[in-house]
Amino acid sequence: MTGHLPEHDASDPVESAVIEGLVRSWPRRATVRRTEPELDIPTMDDLYDDTRDDYPEVLLPFTGHPTWEQLDEDVRTRVRAWAWIAYNKNVVDIEQDVVTPGFGLLFRDVFGTGFSDADRAAVVQSMVDEEYHTLMHLNASALTRRRRGWALPDTTLPESSTVRRHREARAQAESPRAAALTTLAFATVAETSIADYLSLIAGDQTIQPVHQATIALHRRDERAHASVAAEMIASVHDKLGAEDRSFLARALRDGVDAFTATDGAVWSAILAAEQVPDADQMLRDVAADPERRRFLQDCSAIDRLLARFGELEYR
């Protein structure tokens, strides 16, 4: 975890282009940003390949469905571009509306855990990293819009299902403390699971190399964040009473359900924007198909945490 720019391979022109795009986007006056030399490297625009997909076909929930397969390729290309925009927006929504508030609770030590200066510094470093990640994903979406010449506005898409579920869970909480534990749980699920979410795309050779590099750079930081989040919630858990511990375990499971669910509202919005015929029926078909798995399967880090807490009954 750097606390500055994401760790990257300076000899890799694609990763270097992503980092250079990040540097150019960051205000020159920002004190958290290091002064970077001007590098003679390709830009993200230079490396964008109009013939490559923006999003893996295999990750579309309706791939293989007759309605999808019969669409014109230009519509399918636009839907895949929309899917990439939605993927980036989902990451940004979770980072800004779930993870950062969760880290804020830890930094302020709202649970009275007694964190050390080193603990709080690790939290702040993670929060700085999250702002870089947000900017990386904003840049990635802007690149696709610019190179494709399509508007693809974020405002067409609903908030991330994780954000919606988090807000609903907080609204149902019986006290401010319960609401805070809910945020801590959802943030921990996100931070310990997002690397696997990012891995779904990072190694896919069918999509834009710049997209792959963006995801790979983000994923490297998140592996460090996962250990920070896990140790922090363990420290909080150890100081909680029995009732709060049970509540936290249930909230972690709720967070897993939210994070791993296929977000039908996003796909419905995308297909409606492209006026895909019979889209609603196609989405109903795939939702009812037991052969189609959830988008993300692995939240095993939460299983390990619950085992550590002695709370495996909350499975």
Image: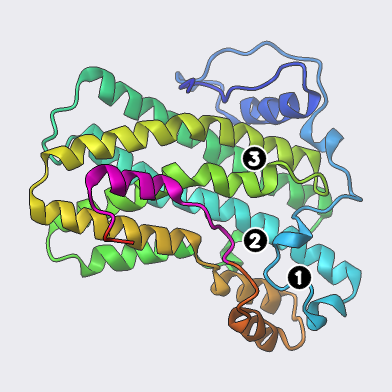
Residue depth check, mark 2 versus mark 3: number of the one nearer the observer: 3
Image point (64%, 40%), residue name = 215
Instruction: Tell me the number on the disc at residue 63.
Output: 1
Front residue of 192 and 304:
304
> Start and end of the magenta stretch?
294-312
Circle 2: element type: loop
Q: Residues within 10 Å of mark 3 (few under 14, many from 20)?
A: many
Separation of marks 3 and 1 at Cα, in angstroms: 22 Å
Report which residue position mark 2 lands on. Answer: 153
Labelled disc at residue 215: 3
The 10 Å Cα crowd at callout 2, few under 14, some 14 to 19, many 20 or more, is: few
Task: Tell me which label, 3 or 1, sits earlier in the chain.
Answer: 1
Of 203 and 28, which appears nearest the observer?
203
Q: Is residue 90 above or below residue 26?
A: below
Q: Residue at x 30, y 47 (%)?
A: 307
Q: Position of residue 34 (x, y in %)?
A: 53, 14
Q: Amino acid at mark 1?
A: Thr
Asked if the residue under mark 3 is in contact with the one under mark 2, i.e. CB atoms within 8 Å, the reply is no
Q: Few, some or many C-alpha atoms within 10 Å of disc 1 (few <14, some 14-19, many ≥20)?
A: few
For marks 2 and 1 on the same chain, the one whose residue lies earlier in the sequence: 1
